[in-house]
Image (spheres, rainbow, N blue to C red):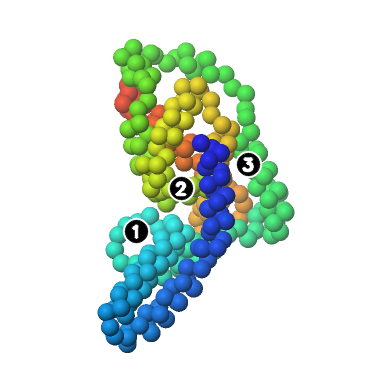
Amino acid sequence: MINKLSNCAEDLTQWSKTHCNKIQADIERCRKQLSQSRTAQGIQDEIHFDNLRQKLNHLLVQEDMYWRQRAKTHWYRDGDLNTKNFHVAATSRKKVNKILSLESDEGIRTTNDVGMRAIAKNYFEELFEGHQSVRSPVINFLNEVIVDEDNAQLTAPFCKEESKEAMFSMQPDKCPGPDGFNPGFYQHFWSVCSDDIFNECCLWMNDGQFPPSLNSTNIALIPKGTDQKNMKDWRPIALCNVLYKLLSKVLANRLKKILHKCIADS
């Protein structure tokens, strides 16, 4: 499954280089052809005009989807095309998210890429560094609240409907993980790939192991406040692969059913 996705991602990357960047040119070409066809007469000319109009509508929808994804405006749902708005939002978003300088812990300001990468690397190494701890003193104070019936429900064989529910609960155009696929890709092709996804996920969860690449994560930085000086002014978020999030959601949905027993009321 992982190898198939990797091959598909490479093919889509090559396809995007020759197709995605030419949408605007195709739109302009189609508009010129439409303008020339307006004065033509005859049944064949009318059919040609309708075909051009349908082609233009299709290209406009493609352009709208492209800029909507780049803008990440999840409040937009349906209605008229608003590509200009998404274009402005995407441009503004890019400016805000760009890191121009960083200050080290010593207060030294750096503007070059090498220095900023070193500051970010040191920050995350310290942030995510493992620390020795002992769990038993905490666990020994916890009361057992999960009965055999609950445990049987938690460990019951997985069904395909659980995977579908988890997959379609995700926002379609959320940022993809390292594999390059967002939830919308899997949702669109669910009828094609659902069996492979379900079988592989069951295998991974039953064995308690999954391919290391599945847990690969991109770290994105979201600006906090209006002025960012050091790494503490950027909030890190993890962009996980969709299949990893699918596994997490399937397990989380099962835990929701008994979670009220594990958390005491205040």
Q: Residue 110 in the image: state x and y as whole percent.
A: 70, 57
- For badge 2, the amino acid type reads Asn
Q: CA distance from mark 2 to mark 1?
A: 18 Å
Residue 76: mark in rendering:
1
Q: Nearer the viewer, residue 101 or 202?
A: 202
Q: Residue 54 in the image: state x and y as whole percent.
A: 33, 69
User: Which of pointers 3 and 2 lies earlier in the amino acid sequence?
Assistant: 3
Asked if residue 171 can be seen in this view, the reply is: no
Q: Residue at x 65, y 47 (%)?
A: 120
Residue for badge 2:
182
Discs 2/1, front: 2
Q: Nearer the viewer, residue 145 or 193?
A: 193
Q: CA distance from mark 3 to mark 2?
A: 25 Å
Q: Residue at x 38, y 55 (%)?
A: 74
Asked if residue 15 can be seen in this view, the reply is: yes
Q: CA distance from mark 3 to mark 1?
A: 34 Å
On the picture, is 105 further left or further right than 98? right
Q: Secondary structure at mark 2?
A: loop
User: Which of pointers 2 and 1 lies earlier in the amino acid sequence?
Assistant: 1
On the picture, is 114 further left or further right than 79? right
User: Which of pointers 3 and 1 lies earlier in the amino acid sequence?
Assistant: 1
Label 2 crowd bin: few (<14), some (14–19), many (20+), radius 10 Å: many
In this rendering, the answer to whether 157 lies above or below 234 is above
Q: Residue at x 38, y 19 (%)?
A: 155
Residue for badge 3:
124
Q: Residue at x 43, y 73 (%)?
A: 27
Q: Quadrant of residue 76?
A: bottom left
Marks 3 and 2 in Cβ contact (< 8 Å):
no
